[in-house]
Amino acid sequence: MKFLSLNLVSFYLLVLPNLARSLQVAVVGTTGNLGSAVIKELSKQNIPTRCLLRHDISDVPVKDNPSTPEEIASSLASLDNVEMIKGDVTDPSSILELVKGCDVVM
């Protein structure tokens, strides 16, 4: 598992697209501005992405303009190649579950 900067991930996406598509990426900060933007871009590139999520979104509807963390997460969960892992970034077992099988953590 490697911890890559956004610049290196951009390099993979632009220069080595076939290699990038074979990666599995784990993302924390799922509902933040940066995290959600990264997840959307990875989904557009058909890169499998696992996201850590502390909110229960099982009955949160998908909205066109999400505003709460739960709504943002619900809209991200509806994207292709995105898997949500319920947990907390401060819980080691949640982090282990998130990164299991992943090549990159963002």
Image: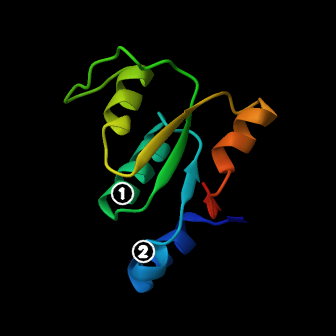
Which residue does the image show at 22% across and 25% down from the upper left? 63
Q: How many marks?
A: 2
Residue type, numbered disc 1: Glu
Report which residue position mark 2 lands on: 13
Residues at circles 1 and 2 in contact by the CB criterion of under 8 Å:
yes
In the image, 28: left or right of 69? right
Query: Residue placed farthest to the right in the image?
Result: 92
- Image quadrant holding the C terminus, namely bottom right
Vertical placement of residue 46 versus 66, above or below: below
In percent of width and height, residue 34 lies at 47, 46
Query: What kind of element bears circle 2?
Result: helix
Q: Which residue is mark 1?
A: 41
User: Could you tell me which quadrant the N terminus lies in?
Assistant: bottom right
Badge 2 amino acid: Leu
Q: Nearer the viewer, residue 48 or 36?
A: 48
Location of residue 48 in the rendering, given as x and y in whole percent from the top left corner: 45, 57
Q: Callout 2: few (<14), some (14-19), or many (20+) C-alpha neighbours within 10 Å?
A: some
Q: Quadrant of residue 33?
A: top left
